Image: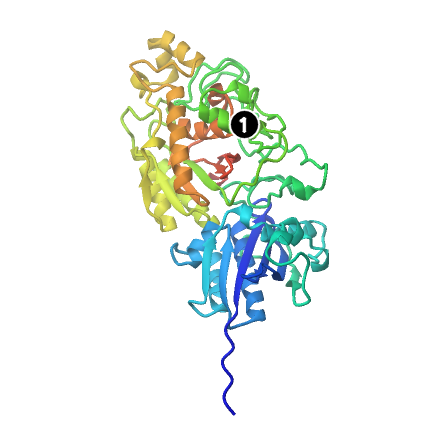
Amino acid sequence: MADQAPRPAREFVVEADGGSRGNPGPAGYGAVVLDPVTGEALVEAAEYLGVVTNNVAEYRGLLAGLRAAAELDPDATVHVRMDSKLVVEQMSGRWKIKHPDMKPLAAEAARVFPPGRVTYEWIPRASNKHADRLANEAMDAGARGEAWSPSDSTAELDAGGADRAAPAGRTAGSRRTGAASAFAPAGTEGGDGGEPAPDGGGAAAGEPLARAGRGRVDAASLGAGTRAATSTGASATGTSGTGTSGTGTSGAGAPATGASGTDASAIGTSGAGASATGASGTGASATGAPATGAPGLGVAAETSGEADVRAAKVVASPGWGPPDMGAPATFVLLRHGETPLTPQKRFSGSGGSDPSLSPVGREQAERVAASLARRGTIEAVVASPLARTRETAGIVAARLGLEVAIEEGLRETDFGAWEGLTFGEVRERHPADLDAWLASPDAEPTGGGESFAATGTRIAATRDRLVAAYAGRTVLLVSHVTPIKTFVRLALGAPPESLFRMELSAASLSAVAYYADGGASVRLFNETSHLR
């Protein structure tokens, strides 16, 4: 009897996704195995994971999808489609896997099929709706204290599954599956616990629909006629009510007459400290609610320049915007450590003596490095060309095993003839110029320095360049007070005078996420817990 011809190997498409409402926060994954010819959904899988990060959830989704395909046919070839640039690039071998929580998950995924039988493709989020809906169903179920139920899932219909090549509905051969362990206790996955990620986590407790991280859902999935609750975005961890701390003022609410000369931090207006940026609610992401922090924040009509208007439209637009098309570019903004000029509160910009870090500043940089190493989410380090930022960045990058790229656009403002002077000394020598500078963002410091308006234009161009270069990645930008404040101001759509209402400490961390649909979300401001 002649041997039977070998059965041809099957081919599958696996689409997978994961989300975390907080990063880390309540998380879940979704995965679907598709017939590449008919588009039929052969297997669906979803699971609530407890409190983990976006990346862990995405890797868990990939692993579930590969395992489901292997159960159907262990000899199959698989094409994976995901909107996570990180997972696709790492599993394709083009990016290194350095985070200790990612390595075992990636290794486990690589073992499901032999090498060469799995290929990877990045797709925009809008093309990954089925897996995204499954992940959100799992997170919603977890929020109710339930396991995801295959029988209750509408993910395929919500994602337009009926529009695929296969006829609408499910054939007898198709099936859905839940994960083996339907419910993981909070904080048990991959060592993430509940430790805030360096991008600040974004969503406040009890805010499952906030657009912090990858857990955002579209308005359509909330039900007809339902609007997202008025939520003003990231829970602020900044300087609310700090008043005179570090600003050189003589009393809370009094006109500011002393400069924070540390790169011109929080110098200026009367009533500084009455409403510090970072008060709860500033940083709203496309919810339509006015910002509740400093007066004028988040009002598009108050801004000037195309970059300001574009950012303000996202903040001020009503309801939920269009899909964000994938993981954001997240900028973790680190102000350099102290220099000898910092405690003296002297203007120290890009046109002065270019001081290096003091011993205190180097210790601060080491503390930042240790904190970021524990969190493990930084994928690249970019620094201003000035000595204090390059030194800070070098200490952090060495701890993370990364190289430092230099970006000229991240340099501090040039304070002209005021470089090295205290606020009081500038008041004595150049009173008219100082008054003009405090009154208008277009005014330059004495001697032809850089105006805040010019700094804003430079930072907007730098932001756009870096967002394009690091799409979907988390990048540490080591810079100075004025540039970091300007990143935050532009993200909020706030007027230029808001720069005078922010206080930024040496070696502090802030974070802004930039989405491909044009949205921006301030996730952290002036975080200094790593220094205590």
Q: Of residues 472 and 402, which is closer to you in this image?
A: 472
Q: Is residue 100 visible?
A: no
Quarter residue 475 falls in = top left
Residue at 69% across, 42% down: 222
Q: Label 1: few (<14), some or many (≥20) within 10 Å?
A: many
Residue lying furthest top: 432
Query: Residue 487, percent across and down?
Result: 45, 30
Q: What element carries label 1?
A: helix
Q: Is residue 401 visible?
A: yes
Q: Of residues 329 and 103, which is closer to you in this image?
A: 329
Looking at the rendered structure, the kind of residue marked 1 is Lys
Q: In this view, does 434 lie above or below 518?
A: above
Q: Of residues 173 and 118, which is closer to you in this image?
A: 173
Image position of 7 (left or right of 146): left
Residue at 43% across, 13% down: 440
Q: Is residue 301 above or below residue 213?
A: above
- Colouring mode (rainbow / by chain / secondary structure / one colour): rainbow
Q: Of residues 39 and 371, which is closer to you in this image?
A: 39
Quarter residue 170 falls in = bottom right
Residue lying furthest left: 353
Quarter residue 275 falls in = top right
Query: Residue 143, percent across and down?
Result: 69, 49
Query: Residue 425, percent across and down?
Result: 35, 14
Q: How many marks?
A: 1
Image position of 5 (left or right of 32): left
Query: Residue 427, percent across and down?
Result: 38, 11
Disc 1 target residue: 313
